[in-house]
Image: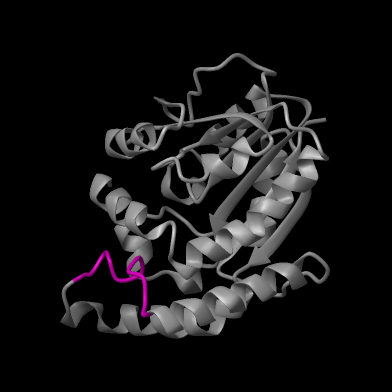
Amino acid sequence: MDDLLELTGRAEAAHFWFRGFRKFVAPVLHDLAGGRDRLMLVDCGCGNGHNIGLLRAHGKALGFDVAEGGLARARAAGWTVLRADVTQIPFASDVFDVATSFDVLQCIDGDLAALREMARIVKPGGAVVVTMAALEVLRGDHSEAWQERRRYTPVMARRLVEAAGLRAERVAFVFASLFPLMLAVRFVQRLSRPFRAHDAAADIAVPSAPVNALLTALLSGEAALARRIPMPIGSSLLVVARKD
């Protein structure tokens, strides 16, 4: 896991996928903040800590993870982090205004336990924002490398949120513009797996500058459009839930 986090750390600033991810998530956090800049925010399963920067724009932000390598890189970057398990969060109840978790739930056995813990630590009226891998048909090398337990449908995501005692305000597909390409790549990966060595770094490698710029622009356009028109499909789900 630490090796994958190190590869991810090299790609997070420049890779089109991570740039697109921030285009989807930043407006959600902005809307939840509603102009406030003294919120308490926490990133649950923060990895290298890169996304804490998205949270810090709206107040005091910190993160936690179980992977020491990621935490070391987060501390070196100046983020406030600690070691903890998302299914046993070491914070009091009703502390945070916003709790986030990005692409973590599909990689752990206790996704419901984790979401219940996130619900517990946010204040009444607070929000939980998560992203999760979508649709089993997109399972491929990336899924195997990160040891994904499952991929979600919108119905699964909504039921999970409600089981955790939260109210789902938004369950939306993202990365719709990449779906056809990803579907083709994942199909080839599954078909060819018996005949080749597994390459965990393939999906994280930054492509050539022109390709990276083109795909970044494509995702930026989708992110702007998705604020007005729900996408019918996508490789990930973006979920915004509220603690009543």
At 57% across and 38% down in the image, what residue appears? 112
How far from the left and from the top, in percent, is residue 165? 72, 33
Q: Position of residue 171 (x, y in %)?
A: 72, 56
> Eyeballing the image, is 126 above or below 90?
below
Direction from residue 138 to residue 146 in the image, left or right: left
Q: Is residue 24 left or right of residue 30?
A: left
Magenta segment's dominant SS is: loop
Based on the displayed image, in which of its 4 quarters is residue 71 positioned? Answer: top left
* Residue 115, placed above or below residue 206: above
**Residue at 53% across, 63% down:** 19
* Magenta stretch contains residue 99: no
> Magenta region: which residues?
198-208
**Residue 204 lies in the magenta stretch:** yes
Residue 50, horizontal then vertical, whole percent? 46, 45
Residue 237 appears anywhere in the view: yes
Residue 105, above or below 236? above
Q: Please, is residue 85 above or below residue 15 in the view?
A: above
Residue at the extreme top of the image, as rendered? 92
Residue located 77% across and 53% down the image:
170
Residue at (52, 45) in percent of width and height: 51
Question: Disc count in the image?
Answer: 0
Horizontal relation, residue 236 to residue 70: left or right: right
Picture quadrant where residue 11 is located: bottom left
Which quarter of the rendered picture does the C terminus lie within? top right
Give percent across and percent down for residue 37. 74, 32
Left or right: 34 with respect to 11? right
